[in-house]
Image: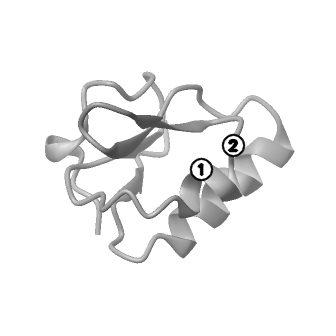
Amino acid sequence: MANRDDRYGDNAPGKFYVDTQCIDCDVCRVTAPSNFTRQEDKGYSYVFKQAQTAEEEAQCQEAMDSCPVEAIGNDGD
């Protein structure tokens, strides 16, 4: 389960975030490409834009549910 205290500082403010458990597997970037991107130099994903539509919300939730190491969290803000 993702830990909000270990989330990357790159994450956009809001409810979804990626923490330091990320293994850079690409699942979130494929599932929700409008919201997740890769930190190229350090090799991890993060939320660059919070969900703004119901479709993006569903994609972010699917990315969270599909993350193999549970590195995506939802603060529910």
Task: Check the image and report above or below for 7 versus 2.
Answer: above
Residue 75, quarter of picture: top left
Farthest front residue? 41
At a point 49% along the width and 45% down the height, the residue shown is 76
Q: Depth check: 6 or 10 in front? A: 10
Badge 1 local density, few (<14 within 10 Å), some, or many (20+)? some
- Label 1 secondary element: helix
At a point 71% along the width and 35% down the height, the residue shown is 34
C-alpha gap between disc 2 and disc 1: 5 Å
The label number, if any, that marks residue 33 in the structure image: 2
The label number, if any, that marks residue 19 in the structure image: none
Badge 2 local density, few (<14 within 10 Å), some, or many (20+)? some
Farthest left residue? 5
Task: Check the image and report above or below for 43 versus 28.
Answer: above
**Residues marked 2 and 1 touching at CB (< 8 Å):** yes
Q: Quadrant of the N terminus?
A: bottom left
- Label 2 secondary element: loop
Locate residue 8, reporting x and y percent. Answer: 25, 35
Q: Depth check: 63 or 52 in front? A: 63
Tell whether 14 sits left or right of 3.
Answer: right
Q: Depth check: 8 or 23 in front? A: 23
At a point 47% along the width and 29% down the height, the residue shown is 14
The kind of residue tagged 1 is Arg
